[in-house]
Image (spheres, coloured by chain):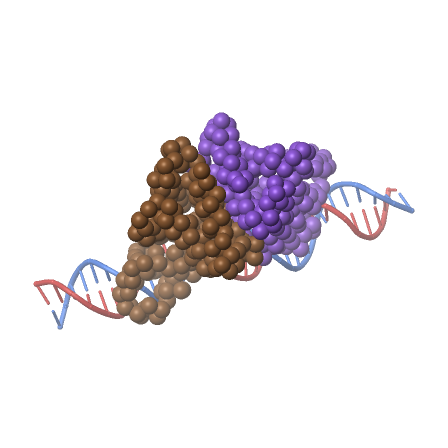
Chain colours: A purple, B brown, C red, D blue
Amino acid sequence: MEMVERRARKPPATRLTVADWTGAALEAMARGGLAAVAVEPLAAALGATKGSFYWHFANRDALIEAALQRWETDHTDAVITMVEAEPDPQARLRTLIGAVIESTAIPGADAIELAMLATADHPHVAPVLARVTQRRLAYTAQLFEGLGLDPDEAADRALIAVSTYLGHAQLAHATPELVPGTPELRRRYVDRIIGLVTAV
Amino acid sequence: MEMVERRARKPPATRLTVADWTGAALEAMARGGLAAVAVEPLAAALGATKGSFYWHFANRDALIEAALQRWETDHTDAVITMVEAEPDPQARLRTLIGAVIESTAIPGADAIELAMLATADHPHVAPVLARVTQRRLAYTAQLFEGLGLDPDEAADRALIAVSTYLGHAQLAHATPELVPGTPELRRRYVDRIIGLVTAV
DNA sequence: GGCGAAACATACGCCACCGTATGGAGGGGT
DNA sequence: ACCCCTCCATACGGTGGCGTATGTTTCGCC
């Protein structure tokens, strides 16, 4: 979430940077998915033309690759570092699950991630998705091991927990009316998830 | 899964029906998502031209609507009727979860559903998705109530169960290497899911 | 203050797809 | 046998996006 901010933002009237393009690409992806990462619309949104774009990038694919890479580095461990502030594994797990469930409640928060899941087949998306998921699973399993579970059981529960998050994100996006809508309901819901997923 | 089979299939050499077009649309959707439901490619795949298509349908949107409606009716309660064969609620829940998890292991089985989730914003997709999800949640909650849980708790657990399925389907599609790969591992995994989700 | 390169605009050809217009084939009914 | 209505092919114009080619500005720098 860095802010390079070379000059003005909306009507640049000045030169654009690679970060401007990747940033616009990620915004477009959040709104309309990978298909919305199109050169000419992005140029229009930035107040420029394709001439600018094709100086900074070889083609559309290069932009996609750069944007995804930026997302991965910007995004990785954003939650985890927050969770690590908690003392014991139990509290960490609650913070983690609470945070990710709550994130699905604020509209557009997981838009890029949902867009990537929607385009998981894409050759540039797949490896990013695999790495992020792998990291999440490993970290979550580690939390469960901290609760005293053996590695097998911890791995399975991590898979269940991550699946539950992904499915909830999907539901919150596709059918928000079928998902706990108030903070209190969500709190109760998170409590029940934790209760089930940490059951002895 | 009916087979109308008017005449020959691949090189029709005869007239096409609405079902031919919606069927081809669903196949294309399973392979390439909603974006792959394109008139001219479909016509080529059916050995016809656009002239045929625009006689049966007003436009591409009408085809999408018809295909989605067909999917919803063909698809609804396919699993549920199988589950209803089981005697007690406990066995029903196991059959249900086992079946849906196993379905994510056979490639392309949930392709259309994943494609719909990937395009949940589409005005024709959203209501279909909402209805199907609503039915699933209601049925799953009913199963949990059959186990003696009060409605609130049953609803929450149904949401958790459905979310877990959706997330698992997502993972199995995006990163199949991170998901239980053998029938034995999946059996153990399903057992653990059931153990957690039915915990007292 | 002029020069060269970096950054951008303009204009073009191309492709894939949508939708329309219009002209046939082909089979049923009488 | 004819006709008509169903079904389909052909041909066309239009749109949106990709990539290239080639000017044009703007800046750093000496």
Which percent across, then down, holds residue B4? Answer: 27, 62
Nearer-the-camera pick, A111 or D7: A111
Residue B27 in sight: yes
Q: Which residue shows up at 59% across the image and 37% down it?
A: A93
Count the numbered circles shown.
Answer: 0
Which percent across, then down, holds residue C24? Answer: 28, 68
Nearer-the-camera pick, D26 or A83: A83
Q: Which residue shows up at 36% across the image and 48% down it?
A: B92
Q: Going by the image, does D10 lie left or right of B184?
A: left
Q: Which residue shows up at 61% across the image and 43% down it?
A: A148
Q: Which residue shows up at 38% across the image and 51% down it?
A: B95
Nearer-the-camera pick, A81 or A128: A81
Which percent across, then down, holds residue A118? Answer: 51, 49
Residue A29 in sight: no
Q: Quadrant of the C terminus of chain B?
A: top left
Nearer-the-camera pick, A71 or B49: A71
Q: Going by the image, does B39 lie left or right of A164?
A: left
Q: Quadrant of the N terminus of chain B?
A: bottom left
Q: Is residue D5 above or below residue A195?
A: below
Which percent across, then down, holds residue B127? Answer: 38, 41
